[in-house]
Amino acid sequence: MHESSSQHRRESVLDHNARAWDRLAAAKVALARPAADDAFDDPRGWLGSGGAADRPWLPARLDGLEVLCLAAGGGKHGPLYAAAGAHVTVVDLSPAMLALDRAVASERRIDLGIVQGSMDDLRMFAGGRFDLVVHPVSTCYVPDVGRVFREVARVTRSGGQYISQHKQPTSLQAGLSPGASGRFEVEHPLTRRDPLPPGPPSRLREAGTKEFVHGLTALLGGICRAGFQIEDIFEPDHTRPGAEGGSFADRAAYLPPYLRVLARRSGAAAAPAARLLVE
């Protein structure tokens, strides 16, 4: 794709998704609800509870760390990391989602840096600024995920951590409800470059947004190629015994919806890999 055409497509997608998330924030969907009061009683404990008990990914102490909460507006991640002692900057595309962070920060008298911008363009930050980048599910909203990882790598210090969560490619490829066979069927090819068609309201798709399927080569390989070393991978368990057929929990038993990745910034940008010649 020609560079100018690719840039126009990117800007169109970003504008569309910014407006979509403004609407979702106004509708007070689950992902646009600020952290509950009890989370602030032990913010470090709450932040560390998202993974399995045997995966203590976060540093023992967050005090004084420079933390970037990327594409993480909504009044939850940023305020909680700041309440745990970190120096936090939140970047998000949606003004309405950032307004929730401002409201929580004001109410709780938390110092929070807030920047409106896209996850794939962090030029406002100096290289190596952040000790930790926290990136909730959002890479599905951009057509070129490699650009995101390169930007994250640039602003992460050597040895710094990158904790990200992504929608599983196979989950996005599959139907949201069982097909005629009673099973969840793959409906979209991994090679699809256009946004997915709109789906009915569900916990798996955000209404009105443009979402893209990114395979593991783009996600995991992209993180490595950007200059990170992957240290752990975790699929959050959303199953539930006795779940009703066709429900979110039932589907999760066959198609885990999310993939969480812990990576650490290498000492230098990754060199281009040598091409393997196969005879």
Image: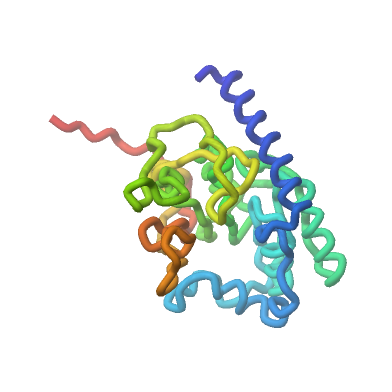
Quadrant in the rendering for residue 49? bottom right
Task: Check the image and name the residue furthest to the front.
Answer: 180
Task: Check the image and name the residue furthest to the left.
Answer: 279
Give 69 or 74, whichever is nearer the viewer.
Answer: 74
Q: Position of residue 191 (x, y in %)?
A: 39, 33
Looking at the image, residue 2 lies above or below residue 89:
above
Task: Check the image and name the residue furthest to the bottom.
Answer: 41
Give 191 or 199, whichever is nearer the viewer.
Answer: 199
For the C terminus, the image quarter is top left
Q: Who's the residue at 69% across and 76% down the image?
A: 39
Q: Where is residue 219 in the image (x, y as percent from the top left)?
A: 44, 46
Looking at the image, residue 32 lies above or below residue 176:
below
Q: Who's the residue at 34% across and 38% down the image?
A: 273
Could you tell me if residue 270 is visible in this image? no
Q: Position of residue 259 (x, y in %)?
A: 45, 57
Could you tell me if residue 273 is visible in this image? yes
Q: Who's the residue at 83% across and 72% down the image?
A: 108
Q: Who's the residue at 42% across and 62% down the image?
A: 245
In-image side of 183 versus 82 (left or right):
left
Looking at the image, residue 189 lies above or below residue 115:
above
In-image side of 231 versus 28 (left or right):
left
Quadrant in the rendering for residue 214? top left
In-image side of 76 versus 55 (left or right):
right
Colouring method of the image: rainbow
* Number of marks present in the image shown: 0
Q: Position of residue 194 (x, y in %)?
A: 50, 30
Give 279 or 43, whichever is nearer the viewer.
Answer: 43
